[in-house]
Each structure stands twice: as structure tokens, then as C-alpha cells.
Amino acid sequence: MRRTLIVLAMLLVANALPTPARADDNLHGLNRVDPALVRGIVAEVDADSGRDRVAQAIRELTSMGYFSQVEVRRADGSLHWYFQERPFVVEVAHEGITELSTETIEKTIRIRTREFLDPNAIRETREAFATEYADEGFADTEVIVRTEPVSDEGDVRVVIEAREVSQVRVMEVRIRGTRDLTEADLQARMESRPPNGLSWMTSQGQYERGKAERDRFRIEGAYLEQGYLKVQVEGPDVTYLPGGRAAIIEYDVKEGPQYTLGEMTFGGDVFFRPSTLSDIIGLETGKPLNRIKLDEGIRAIVDAYSDFGFAFARVVPDFAFDESERIAHVRLDISRGPMVYVRAISIVGNTKTRDKVIRRELQIHEGELFNGSAIKLSRERIFALGFFETVTFETNAVGEDQLDLAVRVTERPTGTASAGLGFSSIDKFVGNLRLNFGNLAGYGVRLDLQLEFGGRRRSFSISYSDPYFLDSPFSLGIDAFRTRQEFASRANVQAFTQSNLGASISVGYKLALFTRAIVTLRDEIIDFSNVSVRSPRFFTDGETRSLSFALRRDSRDHPYDPKNGTLSVGSVEYAGYFLGGDHTFTKYRMVMHQLVTVWEHLTLSFRGEGGLATTRGDRVPFAERYFLGGIFSVRGYDFRSVGPSLLVSRDPSDPYAGVTRVFVGGNKQLFFNSELIFPLIPPAGIKGVVFFDVGNTWLEEEAFFARAMRMGYGLGFRWFSPIGPLRFEWGFPIKKQPEERSRVFEFSIGSFF
């Protein structure tokens, strides 16, 4: 009895005490989230924890990305956690998007299904669609992201709705407030302009908000160049015409006074002579103060200091205005900082290209003083490899006198496999199969296999090139080829077929940064067939064995699309003599090619080539003579039609057989090409070109310029297509001869000049 009473008493006491709460009983609102994911955080917090500790736990829970809200309440001596889960995305759909491709839509959506909805993903999706629409010329398209509930558990369907606005054309650009600069001059600098006759090929006349915003700074820059240092430009204000498909863009200008340069002084760490710094700036006292040129000069001074190891040099301009005389005095305060050494250099972004391929182009190394010019040159040399879309150098200070360099690259596709059919101005219908490895296995080695076939031409070639053979200063190139080319008759011109079978091996040595010495051994068998008039003077078959010595300097900034730099080649080729073979000759060649990019993206190209061939015999072999005319020499004339020609009897034994014209080529040549290259459709890599060519060839018994130079001019466009550079050009001869055409269209696939 006594034991029973004790048990009953214990039960009564137990019922009177509070029951400990289970952890899950304190977690409210968890539907999709497993309670085990949050127990570890909430278990470390109890009712006695301070406010800061509870707030930290809430931040940790919110950062998980599952909850839009987390609350904590005290009840029954414990903490209760209330969660509001984010919507769970079960589907992403889109409505009203007709102007973007399916591929573009898929890559632009940042919201993922089977995940909790992230507000940042909604914002990123809206911004990405706005960018895509702006690029396509639908800048004012409104993109709305909304959610539609599909269950009581918080499942939602996300809908991306686009309210597309028709492409807007710029009908007029107005610049109000201009007095000293004309509105026409300002508009000529701007991207946003009314359409013209080429607008169907370009984006001119198409309104884009980004372009209009950038034009405000272009207007401001035009005034700053003329000394209007306090100019203010407001806008753009866009007014849509009825229908919403055309717009007027307006800017307001407050010119302010024009200032001339007074006194320019230098203070602080003046490492160079003041006269040297003044020369770097390049501004003249008493002339309008060109603020744009001043800023360029300041950057040049910083670069000059960086060449001596002062990586953190700063130049700050200070202006003192004389309002009565409209004069601005300028003081440049220079802080050079400590001399900085390069501690480490890393390569970032190369997934295929080996580090050593990039490092061997560097002109600055670990342990050396920082040098801005060396870094700039390194970037140019790496970009000139042709393997990368972008090349940037990033610095990270690791102390007062040390920094790390990171070479960040973005690789471009360097291997292509292509096949095609087309029509050539020279070979008529042609086919092409090509396999190109521009960066074989990431070692910087080039391998090119090509097969061409057509009505008049058949060829096969294989080319291998290693600029640093076995990681040495030596280069190695191997070429093998077989071609058969039919030269069709035209206007009583001799027709014939030429076949070539040969190979060559080249070994080069790097003498300097841009310069190589190259020795090439060539062995080639030449055969002529289908020649109605065969003469020992022309169409001589046989084998050519030659040895050539060349000095090549190439500072161009890109192998396929150069914009700046120089190519210079001088070579001497010996055939016969101790090498054997059927032909004996000596050929001298000189090539000069200069490129310079001027205002904006306009590139001027000047190329000249001269050649002289001599022989112990009467004539230089036909296959080694110089023939001009065509897309690779003097345009506006048919292929190989510029130069000396002779009338030869079709049959010397028959006086009534008639004659045919034979272009015999010359033993000397000289021609020049000048071009202006400009962007035509930049997103597609299409450029326009206008050109002027001049040149001729001369016989053994003639001197240079014994006959007048032939001239041609024309225009065309070039496309950097996936299968290689394409050229389409229309040439027009100057002082056309009766047998010549008034217009010659040509195109080619392959490298430009």
C-alpha cells in the first residue's frame, strides 16, 4: 500500500512539472525544407541566449537561401522558430518573346526549376533580357517576371513576360544650346544618327539607349577638346513619334567659357625634367586647353614613371582660372611612390593553351622591376598569337615594394573543320575541305590540311609550323603540296595546265623580339600540259631545287586581322648550282607592309613588294617568273594579266594557223597596295575596304619602269567567317586597254595581306 502511494505521488509531481519540448515542436512553417538542415543552427541557441546570438542565428538561416523570413518567439520558457519558405519553382515559362531566338532565351534565363526562387535571379533575368533587347534594337521593351501559385505548399510557376516594342528608328537628333561648335560637327561624332542608304546592313538609325547615353559623353568630349572646361551636357531626352516606331533624341548644352592654356607647372616627385614632361603633355601655351589631350598626357606621364619601376605613380591636375582673360593655369602634382618589383606572375583563364606558350611571350619576369611598357608589349605579343579573344594584366599589391601579376586570357576557338562549295572568280565552281589546328594540343603549333577541287583547280596541301621547336629559339616549318591549275583561254590568250608537286622545310632562328632569320629548302616538280604552243622559251618543265635565306621582321598585332604594326621581309633564293635540279636562277624579294589605325577604327594599310630574278641562261623559267593582276597583287585586272605578253603563232609550221597571246611574265616586278579598312557590321566581323593598287612587271631586256605602271582602284568587304577570312572585292582598271574588262570581281578564302 505504501509503495502504491509513493508511485501515485511521483506521477502527480511529474504531471505538475513542465514537459520539455522536442526540437521539431519548436520549428514552424517547414514544408519542403528538412528540419535536420536547421537543427544544427537552432540547437546552439536557447532561451537564455543573448539578442546578438539570436540575430546571428537568424542571419545564418536566412543565408541558406530557403527562407524569405525567419522569426523567433519565446513561449513556455523556450524559443519557437517560425519560417516562411521561399516559393519553390516547378516551371519557368515565357510569354510575348518573339524577337529573340530560343537559344538566346535559354541562356538569358537565370531562374532554375526545382529550386527555391531567388530574388537576385529575378533581377539578373530582367537585366539580362533588357541587355539582349537593347542589343537587338528593342531597347524600350519591358520585361516583367511574375509568379503564379500552383499548389498550397508554395509551388509556383514563374512567367517571364516581354512587352516588346517595335524597333525604334532615330528620325532626328537635336542638340540645343550650341553656339561655338556646329550641330553638324557634333552629330558626326555620335552613334545615334538617322538612317542612311547602308542602314539595312548596319545598325545606323536604330535607337539604343546605351548608344544615346554614350553620345552625351561624345558631345562633352568635343567641347573639352576645344577648351570648354566647364561644359555641361544634359540628356538624352527621347520623344517617341505617334506609333512608337520613331524617336527624336535631344540634348541640352551649356557651353561655358573657352579657356586657353596659361602656365603649366609640375610639383611633387618630379623625376623627369619639366621640359620633358611638357613635351609628353604636348599642349601649347596660348592655345585652347584640350582637356582630352591633357588626360592622355597625364596617362603617358604615369606610364613613363612605370617604366622605371614606379607602379603606383599618380598625377593629379589642379586648375587655376583667370576668368577675365579666359586663361587656365595647370599644375600637375606627381606622386611616384616606391619602386616596385614583380613577385609572381600567374596565368588565368587558359583551359587549353599551355602556360609556357603564354609565358614565352612575356617581356617581364618575376624578380624584375615593374615596367609598364614591358607589360603593354607582353599583352600585344600574347594577343598576336591569335589564340585569345581578350588579354588583360591584373596587379595585386603584396607590400609597399612588391606586386603580383595575373595574366588573364579568354580563349577563342583556334581549330576549324570546314567543307564548302562555291564559285571562284578564277577557278569557277570550287569545293573545299579543310582541317585546321591553330593551337595543336595547346602547344602553339599550327597544322593545316586542305583539299580544293573545282573545274579548273585541284590541290592538296599540308602545313606544319612550330615557332619554338623543342622549346628553343628555333622554329620549324614543313609544307607539302600538289596542285593542278588550268589557265583558261580568254580573248585569244594562250591556255595551258600547270601541275606542281613539291615540299619544303624551313628552319628559323629568333634574333630579336620581332625578327627571325629563316633558311628554306624547296624541292618542286613542275609540269605543263594542254599547251598548243610549246616553246623552249616558255612552259619549261622540270624540277626545281632551291635554298633560300630570309630575314623577317613582323610586329603586327594579330596574325589574321592586324590593325597596327609592320611586316618586313628580305630574301634571296638560289636554285640549281650545287643543289642540282633542272632550273638555275637567283631571286631577290623585298616586302614592306605597314598598318596603322587612325581615328576610331579606321585602319590604313600600305604594302609594297619588289622582286628580281636572274639566271645564267637566256630566260628565267616560266614557273618562276612574275605575273601580276588579281586579288593578291594589282586589282582591277584579270589574274596574271598585268605584264609583258607576246603574240605567238599557234603552229610555227603553218603560216595560216593564226596567233595567240601569251602572257610571259617578267623577271622583275614592283607593285604597291594601299587600303582604307573600316568596320561595316562589327558584330558579324564584317569590314569594308577601299583600295588603290599600282604595279607592273618587266622583261630581262627591259629596265624597271620601262613600261608604265598599271593602276586600279575599287572597294569590297571582308568577313572573318568560321571557315576563315573571306574577301569580296570589285576592282576597276585605270586607262583600260581594249582587251581588258572595265570591272573585275574577285573573292578568296584565306589570309589577308
Image (cartoon, helix red, strand yellow):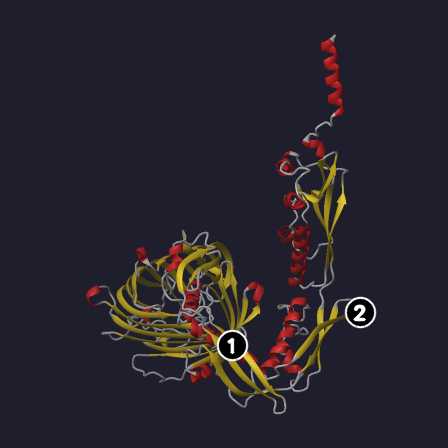
In this rendering, the answer to whether 138 lies above or below 186 is above
Q: Which residue is mark 1?
A: 296
Residue located at (68% from left, 74% from top): 194
* Residue found farthest to the right: 242
Residue 517: image quadrant is bottom left
- Name the mark on residue 242: 2
The quarter holding residue 234 reads bottom right
Q: Are marks 2 and 1 in contact (CB under 8 Å)?
A: no
Front residue of 539 and 608: 608
Residue 750 image point, x, y percent: 45, 63
* Depicted 318 relative to depicted 583: above or below: below
Q: Residue at x 76, y 24 (%)?
A: 16
- Disc 2 secondary structure class: loop
Say what secondary structure mark 1 lies in.
helix
Q: Is residue 541 visible?
A: yes
Q: Nearer the viewer, residue 260 or 403?
A: 403
Q: Is residue 615 left or right of residue 88?
A: left
Question: Which amino acid is tagged 2?
Answer: Pro
Q: Judge whether 285 appears above or below 113 on screen.
A: below
Give the position of the N terminus as an image quadrant: top right
Q: Residue furthest top?
A: 1
Residue 463 in percent (x, y) is at 37, 57
Mark 2, Cα crowd under 10 Å, few <14 / some 14-19 / many 20+, is few
Viewer-nearest residue: 268 or 581: 268
Q: Quadrant of the C terminus?
A: bottom left
In the figure, residue 254 lies in which quadrant? bottom right
Q: Position of residue 181 (x, y in %)?
A: 64, 85
| Residue that sits furthest to the front in the current view | 2
